[in-house]
Amino acid sequence: MRWTLTPDEFTHVWASETGMDRRPYPVNITPAATVRTESEYAALGLRSRYARNTDPDLTAALMLCARADATTITVAGERSGDPERILAFAAVVHNHAGILVARTDTVSVSVCHARAVGERLVTVIGSAPAGVQGPLREPQDAVLGSAGLAPDGSPDEGTAAHFRRKLRSPVDARGFLTVTIAPDDPMSPPTRHRTWLDFTGDGRYLLTTAADLTLTPVSDLDFAEQLLRLAGIESASQPYL
């Protein structure tokens, strides 16, 4: 199921149905309203058009997104030459997922099976071919902490230098992902972070930042599977053992 609302409508129903004034990140990056005066707001008729629990399915979707115990995925990115940002939020509880997607003049609310959330988010991000280069893995200090010189002062032509040059290459799109698994569970892992990079003339990669930097080419299917894996969701094609 899917609902498409204006920013004013979404802000109203979110507060009305969840009791929360603050919209989830990164949806809250976009303007909460388009009207500026009380008379303009009254003319929208939101209180009558969207009385509480008018649409029980929409209410359930919003309440799912507001649950404090939900596993959440946030997506925030941009495409070169496109002023509209890529902004999405997903919440997963058991087999159910709610997804919020913010655009310039709309906010969409949808629900799906938890196993479909990766595919849905990749669709929001946009399709891209997998990068043509193989995976790269190097110590973070070697890639980011060097001035591009080898220990003897000569130009560094090693793998770390190649990695560094790759990260500086032009991109068609880039963005950041965060995945927080069951925050109320003290045994849950720390929040996970990834960066996607669509390099111009090459393809899409996922960047993992830790003691080592890892740059992995991913197809749309790979990307969706990675999102499920990061969120601890068993996929139909690759069930956990």
Image (cartoon, helix red, strand yellow):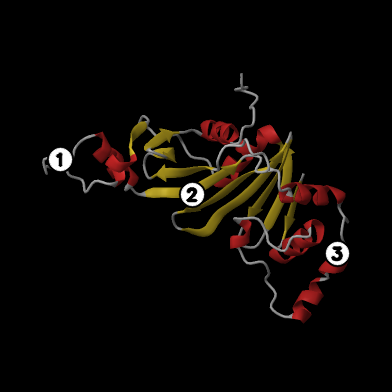
Mark 1 or mark 2, which has the lower sequence index?
Answer: 1
Marks 3, 1: nearer the viewer: 1
Q: CA distance from mark 3 to mark 2?
A: 36 Å
Mark 3 surroundings within 10 Å by alpha-carbon count, few (fewer than 14), some (14 through 19), many (20 or more): few
Marks 3, 2: nearer the viewer: 2
Mark 1 surroundings within 10 Å by alpha-carbon count, few (fewer than 14), some (14 through 19), many (20 or more): few
Amino acid carrying label 1: it is: Pro
Question: Based on the displayed image, in which of its 4 quarters is residue 85 positioned?
Answer: bottom right
Q: Residue 177 versus residue 77: which sits nearer the camera?
A: 177
What residue is disc 3 on?
Answer: 49
Residue 198 x/y as whole percent: 43, 43
Q: Residue at x 42, y 33 (%)?
A: 216
> Which quarter of the image is occupied by the C terminus?
top right
What residue is disc 2 on?
Answer: 175
Amino acid carrying label 3: it is: Arg
Question: Based on the displayed image, in which of its 4 quarters is residue 149 positioned?
Answer: top left
Q: Are marks 1 and 2 in contact (CB under 8 Å)?
A: no
Q: CA distance from mark 1 to mark 2?
A: 33 Å
Q: Residue at x 72, y 80 (%)?
A: 37
- The label on residue 24 is none
What residue is disc 1 on?
Answer: 151
Q: From the viewer's perspective, is residue 118 above or below residue 21?
A: above
Residue farthest along the top direction in this orientation: 241
Q: CA distance from mark 3 to mark 1?
A: 68 Å
Residue 189 x/y as whole percent: 57, 37
